[in-house]
Each structure stands twice: as structure tokens, then as C-alpha cells.
Image: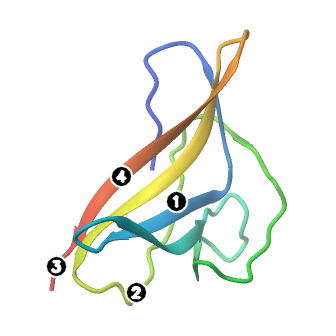
């Protein structure tokens, strides 16, 4: 996942992303995804909510960032939700990016 920016700004993101599943009405968060920037074992996925803790770590820049999807996903629509902050020297504004994907049988 990469976060694109057209302006000369600073982007800071955390190691966490969230995998959400469309149930026909709303997006439900199923997994916490932790990027390779934090895990020496590679990207990991944990059931959400789960008993997973990690330090608050900020990663500069727009990416790319590797994450691994769980191997047991059922067919359907999913989205990856990623929070980040855009800083322009005067302010720091929170944003959320989404990437959609479909798992087919």
C-alpha cells in the first residue's frame, strides 16, 4: 500500500492497518494488519479485536508498505483501512486511506 500526495508535504503513518469485510450493509473490522516495518518476522495479521500490543511507532513517508493478508479469507469484498497524518509545516491533519479488493472462489 502506498499513500500518494501531489503536494510537497510530510506524511507519517503507523505500523497498523485494518482489514474490513463488507457484510452487505457495513464494513466490519476483522483483522489488525502489522507492517514489516515493525515485525522482523514479516507482515502479520491478528484477529480483531485481539490481545495484540505494539509500541506507538511512526513511519515517515508515503510507502510502499508490505502487509500480508490472512490465508483463510472467504470470498467477498474487503478493504484495507490506513490512518495517516499529513503535515505541511503549519499543521498536522489526520486522514484515512482505503484500498478495496475482492476475494474470489
- Residue 47 located left or right of residue 90: left
Distance, label 2 to label 3, CA atoms, is: 13 Å
Depth check: give the residue in front, 18 or 5. Answer: 18
Mark number, residue 53:
none
- Residue 2 located left or right of residue 50: left
Q: In this view, which residue lies farthest toward the left?
A: 105
Quarter of the picture containing the C terminus is bottom left
Distance, label 4 to label 2, CA atoms, is: 18 Å
- Above or below residue 97? Residue 89 is above
Horizontal and vertical percent position of residue 59:
71, 44
Mark in front: 3 vs 1: 3
Figure coloring: rainbow
Q: Circle 2 is placed at which residue position?
A: 71
- Return the disc, 3 or 1, that comes first in the chain's sequence: 1
Q: Circle 1 is placed at which residue position?
A: 66
Label 1 SS: loop
Depth check: give the residue in front, 100 or 28. Answer: 28
Mark number, residue 104:
3
- Residue 92 located left or right of residue 95: right
Q: Determine which quarter of the picture holds residue 85.
A: top right
Amino acid at each position: 500500500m502506498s499513500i500518494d500526495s501531489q503536494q510537497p508535504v510530510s506524511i507519517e503513518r503507523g505500523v497498523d492497518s485494518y482489514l474490513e469485510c463488507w457484510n452487505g450493509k457495513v464494513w466490519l473490522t476483522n483483522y489488525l494488519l502489522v507492517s514489516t516495518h515493525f515485525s522482523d518476522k514479516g507482515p502479520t495479521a491478528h484477529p480483531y479485536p485481539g490481545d495484540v500490543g505494539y509500541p506507538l511507532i511512526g513511519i515517515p513517508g508515503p510507502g510502499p508498505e508490505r502487509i500480508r493478508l490472512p490465508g483463510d479469507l472467504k470470498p467477498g469484498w474487503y478493504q484495507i483501512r490506513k490512518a495517516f497524518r499529513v503535515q505541511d509545516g503549519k499543521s498536522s491533519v489526520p486522514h484515512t486511506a482505503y484500498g478495496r479488493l475482492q476475494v474470489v472462489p
